[in-house]
Image (cartoon, grey):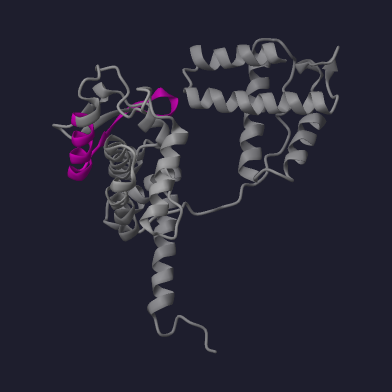
């Protein structure tokens, strides 16, 4: 089955033009499924997992075993990966039917994204400069500030941020060219503060970099990884004194929510975020309603239950 998985990932790359992140997620899910088959001695031929031996009951058992240690949303994603893999095998006549097609997807829990208030966001943005004296490198402080400012100003995903090259940024117009999910290209926009932070970082650390070089780089000159970007946002969040634990995705959520609160329409926010469906963007209205209800409960004299 490992050979089939390699062929499937190649198909995603060459024919579906899927992103590196998507291929990585599919690969991890399918490798986990194969490991489950082998450890459970299921669907094996001479000790090797074989796709043609997989049944709906086996896929159901895999999903059931995950319930004890994995969130429902992750189980749903893994089942989606398995279905897509077997669809590929059916399409290429490697198997006759998709054993995962009838396995039900668990209903994912509904949750509101973590959102920073405007005040909390400002505290996070100010954190790199406050900790500059403790930092090992003034350049890393400039970079971290530029990273935080860029995500909050543009609302781009962390994978989009780490994929930026020098040539993708136009400071004069305040725009950046972003390659989003499905390798779809869009323009994102930078406010004046983000442009100033990026200009300071580039002039100090990346002024000699060629056009194709990564915009945000580590000490080795290689592109900043998503994990490193997540760690630096978390580190400055802890230094900022705010009670929430910020992530790059929380900054993206905050970007969208603050625009919505300021009266920007959902269609515009959808375009800025690079969402394919408006329904994905609509969850930010729930964040706004939750904030309104919290303010109402805190302020209205008839909102609280009598003691």
Instruction: Estimate the x, y position of residue 206 in percent, counting from the top left.
Output: 24, 26
Q: Taking 61 as reference, is 266 above or below it?
A: below
The magenta segment: 179-203
Q: Position of residue 224 (x, y in %)?
A: 39, 29
Establish if 219 lies above or below 49.
below
Q: Nearer the viewer, residue 186 or 173?
A: 173
Please tell me whether residue 151 is drawn above or below residue 177 in the rendered image: below
**Residue 55 occupies quadrant:** top right
Residue in view at x 79 percent, y 25 percent: 37
Q: Is residue 185 magenta?
A: yes
Quadrant for the C terminus, please.
bottom right
Q: Quadrant of residue 187?
A: top left
Residue 222: quarter of image: top left
Residue pushed farthest left? 172
From the viewer's perspective, tell me whether residue 39 is left or right of residue 177: right
Q: Is residue 1 left or right of residue 40?
A: left
The residue depicted at 41 percent of the width and 62 percent of the height is 289
Q: Nearer the viewer, residue 23 or 128?
A: 128
Q: Visible in this render: residue 3? A: yes
What is the residue that sits farthest to the bottom in this orientation? 307
Picture coordinates of residue 140, whole percent (x, y) = 31, 36
Viewport quadrant of the N terminus: top right
In screen coordinates, is 71 left or right of 48? left
Q: Residue at x 58, y 16 (%)?
A: 9
Task: Tell me which secondary structure the magenta stretch mostly adopts.
Answer: helix
Q: Can residue 281 be seen here?
A: no
Q: Is residue 163 magenta?
A: no
């Amino acid at each position: 089955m490992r050979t089939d998985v390699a062929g499937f990932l190649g198909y995603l790359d060459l024919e579906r033009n899927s992103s590196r992140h998507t291929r990585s997620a599919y690969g991890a899910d399918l490798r986990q499924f194969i490991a489950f088959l082998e450890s459970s001695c299921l669907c094996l031929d001479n000790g090797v997992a074989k796709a043609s031996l997989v049944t709906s009951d086996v896929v159901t058992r895999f999903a059931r075993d995950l319930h004890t240690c994995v969130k429902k949303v992750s189980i749903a994603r893994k089942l989606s990966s398995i279905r897509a893999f077997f669809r590929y095998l059916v399409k290429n006549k490697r198997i006759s039917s998709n054993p995962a097609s009838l396995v039900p997807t668990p209903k994912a829990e509904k949750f509101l994204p973590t959102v920073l208030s405007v005040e909390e966001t400002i505290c996070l943005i100010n954190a790199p400069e406050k900790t500059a004296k403790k930092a090992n490198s003034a350049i890393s402080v400039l970079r971290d500030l530029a990273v935080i400012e860029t995500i909050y100003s543009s609302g781009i995903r962390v994978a989009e941020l780490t994929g930026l090259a020098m040539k993708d940024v136009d400071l004069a117009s305040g725009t950046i060219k972003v390659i989003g999910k499905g390798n779809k290209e869009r323009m994102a926009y930078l406010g004046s503060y983000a442009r100033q932070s990026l200009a300071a970082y580039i002039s100090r650390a990346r002024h000699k970099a060629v056009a194709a070089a990564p915009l945000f780089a580590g000490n080795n000159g290689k592109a900043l990884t998503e994990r490193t970007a997540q760690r630096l946002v978390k580190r400055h969040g802890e230094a900022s004194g705010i009670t929430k634990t910020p992530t790059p995705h929380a900054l993206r959520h905050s970007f969208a929510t603050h625009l919505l609160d300021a009266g920007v329409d959902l269609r515009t926010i959808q375009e800025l975020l690079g969402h394919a469906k408006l329904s994905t963007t609509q969850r930010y209205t729930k964040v706004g309603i939750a904030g309104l209800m919290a303010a109402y409960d805190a302020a209205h004299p008839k909102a609280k239950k009598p003691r």
